[in-house]
Image (cartoon, rainbow, N blue to C red):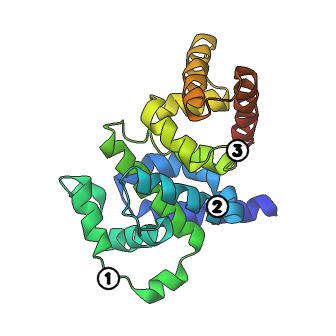
Amino acid sequence: MVWGIIASVCSAVVSAVSSIGPAASAFCTSVLPKIVPALETIGSVIRGVANTVLQILGIFKPDEDVEDMGDRAIQAGEAGIKPDKFDNFEEYMDEIRNFKLDPEKSAQMSGVEKIAAGLAIGATGLEKKFDAPEGSMGPLWLLAASNPAYFTAERLVNLVKGGGDMGTVVRFFEGKLGPADAVDTRQTLMGLERELSPGKSDDVIYAELNAAKDAVRKLDQ
């Protein structure tokens, strides 16, 4: 019964986010099914982390919010306003910023749907800003959903700026890399953590990475 409810909620969220268009397709397929349960329980926490990350990295303006931008992206998408229709992402963002929301439609959508759409748009913006492959930044929110106490906004910004391919980073935490790649990625992550927390010992960093891996793996269960 519980799994049936979760599946139903997930289907509704995917349907809503899909209205954004092709830019959100990878997010809907590979990220949303794993994070919807977390959005149901700690959505406000994930929203707060994402707001800070996206504001620091210049995807959202300081007063913009993941949930509101998601609402705008969904309603604009239903009106045919989608990222792939614009020459650059900032033109799209300006369009949805100025889009007139229908309050009745906003009231009919859940916070989970809006936050999920905002995360999808944020991931697309990160891909454009850092010239990353389409679909590569969505997994960033898997980390935030798995353990927001560890994957803080500061740590996620650090990962985006210096962690290389986000897909590889997430596969490391999921335990899906081969031995050599796992060792290389662990060394990269430990180096980033040393920069973030200079007083932390390698043993503590190593233990924290292992605990983070356990948390991320639970999203697959």
Residue name at image x 46 percent, y 89 percent: 104
Would you name the residue on which mark 1 appears? 100
- Are there few (<14), some (14-19), or many (20+) residues within 10 Å of tag 2? some
Q: Position of residue 179 (x, y in %)?
A: 64, 12
Which of pointers 3 and 2 indicates the residue nearer the eye? 2
Would you name the residue on which mark 3 appears? 219
Give the residue type that dot 2 points to: Val
Where disc 2 sits, the SS reads helix
Give the residue type that dot 3 points to: Leu
Residue 165 versus residue 20: which sits nearer the camera? Answer: 165
Would you name the residue on which mark 2 appears? 45
Residue name at image x 77 percent, y 58 percent: 3
Residue 160 versus residue 154: which sits nearer the camera? Answer: 154
Residue 26 position by quadrant: top left
Where disc 1 sits, the SS reads loop
Tell me the quadrant of the picture where the N terminus can be found.
bottom right
